Amino acid sequence: MQIIRHVLRTFVSICLLLSVLAFASPLASAQKYLFYVGTYTQDTKSKGIYAYRYDAVSKQITSLGLAAETTNPSFLAISPNGRFLYAVNEVPNYKGPNSGGVSAFSIDKASGKLIFLNEVPSRGADPCYITVDKTGKYVLVANYTGGSLAVFPVLEDGKLGEASDFVQHTGHGANPQRQEGPHAHSIDLSPDNRFAFVDDLGLDALLTYKFDSHTGKLTALNGVVTKFDPGAGPRHFALHPSGKFAYVIAEMQMTVTALTANLEDGTFKQLQTISTVPPDFKGRNDDAEVAVDPSGRYLYASNRGHDSIIWFAIDPGKGTLSPLGYTAAMIKEPRSFEIDPSGTLLFAENQKSDNIVVYRMDEKNGSLTPTGQTLDVSSPVCVKFVQVP
């Protein structure tokens, strides 16, 4: 009997250990990431896209060097399955006039290297923003100088096919130097994949398109256009985690506009427009990035010229913003920033100081404090994370 009881106890112990490991492994693996840095390569020391390993628990960052050599991969997007990375090649004349490029890569999660798959014309000059739809079947691109949008099907091997749709914006804004024509600056999808939201800096507008994930087609919705002040220059869009509010940063006006969001019909209504710089600031400034932290309590926006990141408190009921503070520590032309998957660190990409500065986000008040970690990257623009085993 003692032998039987011992065997049973051993068996139960093994089962418990296996069950703990079964639950622990996914949790442990969920904290491991690669992240990729998109850069400008023309007239800089950069060669393309750079890779790092990141442990979200220990906050350890390890450089893996150049992941792929490619021209001006300014903005990146990761496929939902984490297998592929897509980059715009922000140039005016890829294989012909008035077009940039879009590059596809497969991700080697063991080494962090990117394996080039193919490249297609973006159908408009200087593509500056890219996103992958929620099904992973389509890549959507905004062409800045071209003032247009393009959609590309993702083939089974991750390569990009010929464009399934193309939309050319028309018109101009109030500023003849910067808004002589349309300048599509970003394209983002609603959580249910039904709508595409496009900021056009040249038209002072946020346009809503119906997106068909079966055909890869964009359809403009009649009358569904959110207009901003003349000369505002809307650049990037951020949706609140609740889906009730959205925020648009205006590059030229140096403001963030808070909006109510109706995700049933893709419409927005303006609530508030608030400055991203102090009232007494008189210098040159171009706003750049905007993001809401995962808790939905704080909004961050970057200033190029004032060289700072401002954070706001978000009213949970109204969606309106109240400024809380700025950080200017170690920042020079923060073209973009990315909040890490744990929601505790902010990575600021400083184009003019050739580095990425990592800040700790205070959950109590949203403030940013330098962690002491600075990554040397020439002309960084964009950071994107992908989970690894």
Image (cartoon, rainbow, N blue to C red):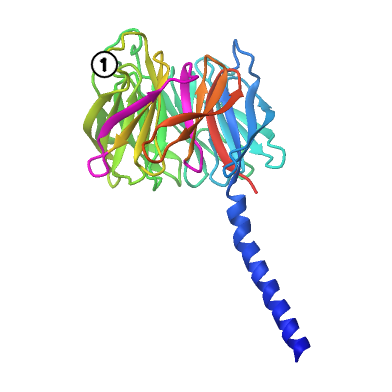
> Residue, x 33% and y 13% (percent of image)?
179
Point out the stretch of residues depicted in magenta: 315-343
Please state the horizontal and vertical placement of residue 22, each as a whole percent of the image: 63, 63
Q: Secondary structure at mark 1?
A: loop
> Residue, x 64% and y 14% (percent of image)?
45
In the picture provided, is 203 more to the left or to the right than 270?
Answer: right
| Front in this rendered view, residue 211 or 261 | 261
- The quadrant of the rendering that contains the N terminus is bottom right
In the picture provided, is 368 more to the left or to the right than 77?
Answer: left
**Quarter of the figure with residue 320:** top left
The question of residue 332 being in magenta is answered with yes
| Front in this rendered view, residue 311 or 129 | 311
The question of residue 142 being in magenta is answered with no
Q: Residues within 10 Å of mark 1 (few under 14, many from 20)?
A: few
> What residue did someone put label 1 on?
279
Can residue 51 be seen here? The reply is yes
Which amino acid does the dot numbered 1 rest on?
Pro
Please state the horizontal and vertical placement of residue 350, each as a whole percent of the image: 51, 20
